Image: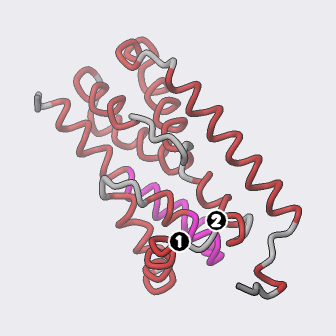
Amino acid sequence: MIKSPQNQPTRRSRLGAIAMIGLMVAFSLALLKVDFAAFGEYGYLGVFLIVLLGNATVIVPAPAFVAAFAAGRTLDPWLVGLVSGVGAGLGETTGYLLGRAGRSAIGDHPRFARISDHVRRWGALAVFVFAALPNPLMDVAGMAAGVLRLPFWKYLLACSAGKILRFTALALLGHYGWP
């Protein structure tokens, strides 16, 4: 397969992708050592940081939802949802930045093409839906938004709004004693 020059990875995009992957691996390894049961001592700041780091991973999924669910049992679930959603939205910027590094850093996967079509067609609304639903495709949607050059503020706003909705629901489930 012959690639056109504009699809060739540049040295800068390769280095950016390698740096982002390195950061994601470091965050993932740090999360493996987090005692999610002890976060209550740290309150809302602890929940924010756990969720931020948990959503900054792309390679290894981190159980950030556990922090919001558990925090909803002892803290105000509405505030837990807000704090967690903002942290998750900020954490998801790793996927967006990886996409901004260039499509060549991501490759040509059929799932990426399908999700990219949704983001191209619906923009921030697609990002909101992917962020609100519990699925692993948000990372891919973030990369697609970066590749498509969706303005960062639109991406962050839509992603955070979707995550706030999702994490508020989780915190409320924890608060009202769902198993």
Q: Residues within 10 Å of mark 1 (few under 14, many from 20)?
A: few
User: Residue 10 location in percent, x, y?
Assistant: 86, 69
- Per the model, the C-alpha gap separating discs 1 and 2 is 8 Å
Mark 1 sits on what residue?
109
Q: Residues within 10 Å of mark 2 (few under 14, many from 20)?
A: some
For numbered disc 2, what is the local secondary structure? loop
Question: Is the Cβ of the residue at disc 1 closer than 8 Å to that at disc 2?
Answer: yes
- Direction from residue 118 to residue 10 in the image, left or right: right
- The amino acid at mark 1 is His
Q: Quadrant of residue 17?
A: bottom right
Q: Is residue 54 above or below residue 40?
A: below
For numbered disc 1, what is the local secondary structure? loop
- The amino acid at mark 2 is Ile
Pick the front one: 2 or 153: 2
How many numbered discs?
A: 2
**Label number found at residue 106:** 2
Identify the magenta region.
143-163
- Name the residue at 59% across, 74% down: 108
- Direction from residue 96 to residue 33 in the image, left or right: left
- Direction from residue 42 to residue 164 in the image, left or right: left
Q: Quadrant of residue 154?
A: bottom right
Q: Which quarter of the rendering shows the N terminus? A: bottom right
- Name the residue at 68% across, 72% down: 103
Pick the front one: 100 or 107: 107
